[in-house]
Image (cartoon, rainbow, N blue to C red):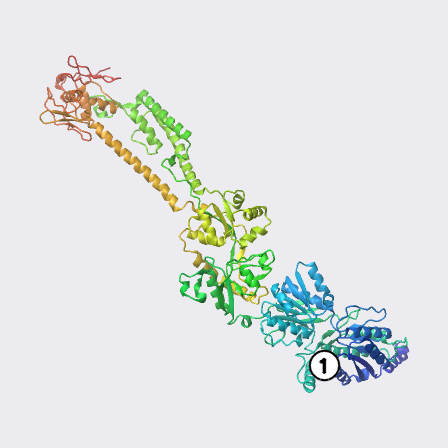
């Protein structure tokens, strides 16, 4: 089988070798800059031709010839004549030109009619002409790709506000994709066009006044360099501005002579510096400039020369592949005839399939003849020259290696003096006590000042503190302008804003913030509400008057019931001296009327008394009363504690809702601060009502400083809304201030910087380092602790201030003192009343009467609830046995007679007995005297007692017969018992 096909295979191989022999072909290049000291396009074509002709593959490629035609001016007629000359020479492709728009249109039309490939290195035409059988090959990247690359950079750099400078009228058409992106998004892009004078100075001044930080320049390399020079004169080449150049000839810019090397200038490049012929190409170009020019006209390699170099290699590669299948023969064509080149369509198809690595990167084309699958290298200026920070790929999009800004600490902060704007606010930034004697940064102290010292030590920079001019943090006006520290950052008057500057979304749009160095929230400051001062009868407050009245009635009722029950029951009558039972029988009842009223008092006060109930009935009455008092005392204790606690916790407002629902207490914030902005922009209904109240309230409830707000809180019915950290600081130094409720939101303080500042990343890292080492917490304790008030989050947790507690204790001591004074006066009155009956017998038998009545057996029996049996002798015997002074009949008669007849001072003599040395003075116990008794058989305790003689007019003792005409003293309910030998008679 293989032997049968062998002749056919040999014939095919012979035909192919015959058709693919060495071939010489011609190219035509149109240049619009014929000068030797130009962009080096002629040299690039020559270098490309020589490198191809010197290649070792001449057997398949043949000899290359390139005819160069020059256009002296951008004329359609001249271009047409030149193209007719080119067609008559029989070329396989036309290259160029680099800049003439009108020439490009004529060349494209003629090449399309003759079907001769046209490899264009000029920028893309705005008005695209469609050819049904043939298209032009674009070797330069399209405007669409450049526009997408710029849009990707803006997105990556998070530039919300940008400005586009257009040097030509077709700028908006070139960047159509970029404009569409801004129309879809909420970002802002302002477009400014250079006028006919081509002076960018007025335009740059407008951009500076608009506080725009990102500037896009759509111009060629020459005009871009002029714009940068004017920006340097206006001070706009600094770390706060970013320039994005759309020109692909970024390497042609001389950036060494710019005023500030820290400026961020970003551009694009398509050069493949790793190409093996790139260095030789650059050296040859520089050598040509040195030989033919006084100085190098460009700082780098012009793009058009590199594109022409790649264009020659692209056409040769396509012809080489086409020559493998068919003999490519050139045909002389005429502009006057309709004849076309027969191999033109085939060569165009092979050109679209070419893939090679050139000086401008990977070369490949899509079906439309546009360049594809290539990369735009994103370059940035630095002190060491240009360096790549990323790339944009036509298929993969943006890929960044380093985020802008890429300058490190050594390039930006080392030994750099930064201007710090700040505001006086305790304890963040304060003036020292002797600040008038100091200069510079030494005049200030506080948390932010110490933190700034820590940051300067880490990042190795210097700083100069300057107070903000208008004394506010920063708020946006109706015309979009900002005041305070934010305004100074926007206008680039300061490099950093180090203060209690709150990070908000609105401020983030115009300035940059570091990471928060302190987290906080909005709180409510109000003065401590002091309840009513406790009065002398404030101990009655736990119970209502009705409860106290019923308790009094219950006390009276229990006392009366106890007295009656004790009288009725026989078990409460008892003999206190059971040893004398054989001699006398004396029964007493401890529940006298006074004791009956005293016993419930002891139980009510939980102190008890010496009186103990004996009978079951009295014990039941006592138990019920004790149970009642247990409940009452427990309730009183609980109510008293609750009453004092409620009095301490009594505040008119307890939350932000309470504050919003009332109008008696005014409330406001600092004017121009983040707290004011929070309420102004809030969508929460409660906060909206509060903002409407604060905005419309007259006089204004807004204050200019925190000190003014605190003074207003202390001196009027006003609540101040401020950050929780400041609230905590001032509460520890003024015990009359407190915080109401919790936090209204959560936010943080950060260091403010101009938009696009290169210092942001470095300060973020430094702040994180301070937080990890707990140095910020140490600084906070240094400036917040040390106040005279307890550190509490809520006044309700700590109760009333010590002053109020001292007032309560003082009132208790005053009540006790008043009671003791009253009792002392009462005791003194009792003493004086008792002295009215004091009786003294002198040794001569005289009786001295005082202002009162003598102590007698009757009063003794009544006070002690004693029922006396027998006569006065037994009563006297009872007093002798019970430890009381013995009372003889004679003594009794003398005392009673004297007290009855002499209210003042009296004397008398006893009869029938010897005078006794006896004093009946309060507090003294008289000497005991044996009781003379006679009985049957001469033994004491007989069945009868002989009567004693009595003084005339003196009543007899109970049990004695009175003298004629004298009344007998008898006790009501007296029970008389006769004690005999073996029997008892009532």
Residue at figure coordinates x 60%, y 49% from the top left: 683
Residue nearer the viewer, 970 or 254 = 254
- Is residue 746 in view? no
Image coords of residue 437 (percent x, y):
40, 65
Horizontal placement of 829 versus 810: left or right? left
Between 479 and 420, the one nearer to me in the picture: 479
Q: How many marks?
A: 1
| Residue 842 position in % (x across, y down) | 11, 27
Residue extending furthest top?
Answer: 964
Question: Relative to 848, is 183 above or below?
Answer: below
Q: Residue furthest bottom?
A: 291
Query: In the image, is residue 935 above or below residue 823?
Result: above
Left or right: where 642 falls relative to 172: left
Please identify the quadrant where the N terminus is shown.
Answer: bottom right
Residue 712 point in image, percent of width and height: 46, 49
Q: 119 or 14: nearer the eye?
A: 119
- Direction from residue 226 to residue 850 in the image, left or right: left
Residue at mark 1: 40
**Residue 911 visible in this rendered orientation of the protein:** yes
**From the image, which quarter does the C terminus lie in?**
top left
Give the quadrant of residue 858.
top left
Q: Which secondary structure lies at badge 1?
A: loop
Q: Residue furthest front?
A: 197
Q: Quadrant of residue 259?
A: bottom right
Q: Position of residue 3 (x, y in %)?
A: 89, 78
Estimate how packed mark 1 is, as few (under 14), some (14 to 19) or many (20 or more) residues with alpha carbons within 10 Å: many
The picture quadrant where one finds residue 619 is top left
């Amino acid at each position: 089988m293989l032997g049968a096909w062998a002749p056919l295979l040999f014939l095919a191989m012979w035909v192919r070798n015959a058709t693919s022999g060495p071939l010489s072909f011609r190219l035509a290049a149109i240049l619009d800059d014929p000068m030797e000291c130009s962009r080096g396009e002629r040299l690039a074509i020559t270098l490309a031709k020589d490198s191809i002709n010197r290649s070792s593959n001449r057997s398949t490629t043949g000899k290359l010839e390139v005819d160069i035609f020059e256009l002296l001016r951008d004329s359609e007629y001249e271009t047409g004549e030149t193209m007719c000359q080119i067609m008559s020479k029989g070329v396989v492709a036309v290259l160029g030109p680099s800049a003439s728009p009108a020439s490009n249109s004529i060349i494209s039309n003629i090449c399309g009619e003759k079907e001769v490939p046209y490899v264009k290195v000029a920028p893309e035409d705005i008005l695209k002409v469609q050819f049904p059988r043939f298209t032009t090959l674009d070797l330069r990247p399209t405007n669409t790709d450049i526009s997408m690359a710029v849009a990707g950079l803006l997105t990556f750099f998070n530039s919300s506000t940008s400005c586009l400078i257009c040097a030509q009228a077709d700028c908006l058409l070139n960047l159509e994709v970029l404009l569409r992106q801004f129309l879809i998004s909420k970002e802002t892009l302002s477009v400014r066009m250079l006028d006919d004078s081509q002076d960018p100075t007025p335009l740059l001044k407008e951009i500076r006044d608009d506080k725009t930080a990102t500037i896009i320049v759509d111009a060629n390399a020459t005009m871009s360099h002029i714009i940068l020079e004017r920006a340097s004169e206006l001070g706009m080449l600094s770390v706060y501005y970013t320039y994005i150049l759309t020109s692909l000839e970024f390497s042609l810019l001389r950036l060494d002579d710019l005023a500030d090397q820290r400026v961020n200038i970003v551009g694009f490049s398509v050069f493949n510096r790793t190409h093996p012929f790139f260095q030789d190409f650059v050296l040859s170009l520089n050598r040509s400039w040195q030989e033919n020019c006084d100085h190098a006209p460009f700082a780098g390699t012009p793009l058009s020369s590199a594109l022409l170099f790649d264009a020659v290699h692209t056409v040769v590669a396509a012809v080489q592949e086409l020559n493998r299948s068919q003999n490519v023969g050139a045909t002389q064509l005429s502009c006057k005839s309709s004849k076309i080149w027969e191999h033109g369509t085939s060569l165009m198809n092979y050109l679209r399939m070419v893939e090679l690595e050139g000086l401008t990167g990977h070369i490949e084309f899509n079906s439309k003849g546009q360049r594809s699958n290539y990369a735009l290298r994103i370059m940035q200026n630095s002190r060491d020259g240009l360096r790549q920070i990323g790339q944009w790929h036509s298929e993969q999009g943006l890929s960044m290696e380093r985020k802008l800004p890429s300058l490190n600490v050594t390039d930006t902060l080392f030994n750099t003096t930064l201007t710090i704007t700040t505001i006086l606010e305790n304890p963040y930034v304060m003036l020292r006590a002797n600040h008038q004697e100091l200069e510079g940064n030494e005049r200030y102290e506080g948390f932010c000042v110490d933190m700034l010292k820590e940051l300067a030590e880490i990042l190795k920079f210097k700083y100069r503190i300057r107070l903000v001019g208008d004394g506010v943090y920063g708020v946006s006006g109706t015309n979009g302008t900002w005041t305070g520290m934010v305004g100074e950052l926007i206008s680039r008057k300061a490099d950093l804003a180090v203060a209690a500057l709150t990070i908000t979304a609105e401020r983030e749009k115009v300035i940059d913030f570091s990471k928060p160095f302190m987290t906080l929230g909005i709180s409510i400051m109000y003065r401590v509400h002091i309840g009513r001062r406790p009065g002398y009868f404030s101990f009655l407050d736990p119970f209502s008057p009705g409860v106290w009245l019923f308790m009094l009635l219950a006390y009276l009722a229990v006392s009366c019931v106890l007295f009656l029950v004790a009288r009725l029951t026989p078990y409460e009558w008892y003999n206190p001296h059971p040893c004398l039972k054989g001699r006398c029988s004396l029964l007493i009842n401890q529940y006298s009327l006074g004791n009956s009223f005293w016993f419930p008092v002891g139980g009510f006060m939980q102190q008890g008394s010496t009186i103990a109930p004996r009978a079951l009935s009295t014990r039941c009455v006592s138990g019920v009363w004790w149970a009642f008092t247990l409940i009452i005392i427990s309730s009183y204790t609980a109510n008293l504690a609750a009453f004092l606690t409620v009095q301490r916790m009594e505040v008119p407002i307890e939350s932000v809702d309470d504050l919003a629902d009332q109008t008696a207490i005014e409330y406001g914030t600092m004017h121009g601060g983040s707290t004011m902005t929070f309420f102004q922009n809030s969508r929460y209904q409660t906060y909206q009502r509060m903002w409407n109240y604060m905005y419309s309230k007259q006089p204004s409830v807004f204050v200019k400083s925190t000190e003014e707000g605190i003074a207003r809180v202390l001196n009027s019915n006003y609540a101040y809304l401020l950050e929780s950290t400041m609230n905590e600081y001032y509460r520890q130094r003024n015990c009359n201030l407190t915080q109401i409720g919790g936090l209204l939101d959560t936010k943080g303080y950060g260091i403010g910087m101009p938009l696009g500042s290169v210092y942001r990343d470095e300060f973020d890292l430094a702040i994180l380092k301070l937080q990890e080492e707990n140095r910020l917490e140490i600084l906070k304790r240094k400036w917040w602790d040390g106040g005279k008030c307890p550190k509490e989050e809520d006044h309700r947790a700590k109760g009333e201030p010590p002053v109020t507690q001292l007032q309560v204790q003082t009132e208790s001591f005053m009540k006790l003192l008043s009671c003791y004074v009253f009792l002392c006066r009462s005791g003194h009155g009792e003493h004086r009343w008792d002295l009215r009956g004091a009786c003294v017998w002198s040794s001569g038998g005289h009786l001295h009467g005082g202002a009162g009545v003598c102590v007698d057996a009757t009063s003794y029996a009544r006070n002690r609830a004693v029922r006396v049996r027998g006569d006065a002798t037994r009563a006297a015997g009872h007093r002798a046995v019970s430890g009381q002074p013995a009372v003889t009949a004679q003594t009794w008669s003398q005392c009673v007679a004297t007290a009855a007849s002499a209210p003042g001072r009296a004397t008398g003599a006893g009869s029938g007995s010897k005078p006794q040395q006896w004093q009946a003075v309060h507090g003294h116990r008289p000497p005991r005297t044996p009781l003379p008794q006679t009985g049957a058989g001469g033994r004491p305790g007989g069945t009868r007692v002989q009567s004693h003689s009595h003084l005339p007019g003196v009543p007899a003792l109970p049990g004695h017969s009175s003298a004629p005409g004298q009344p007998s003293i008898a006790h009501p309910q007296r029970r008389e018992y006769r004690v005999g030998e073996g029997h008892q008679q009532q």
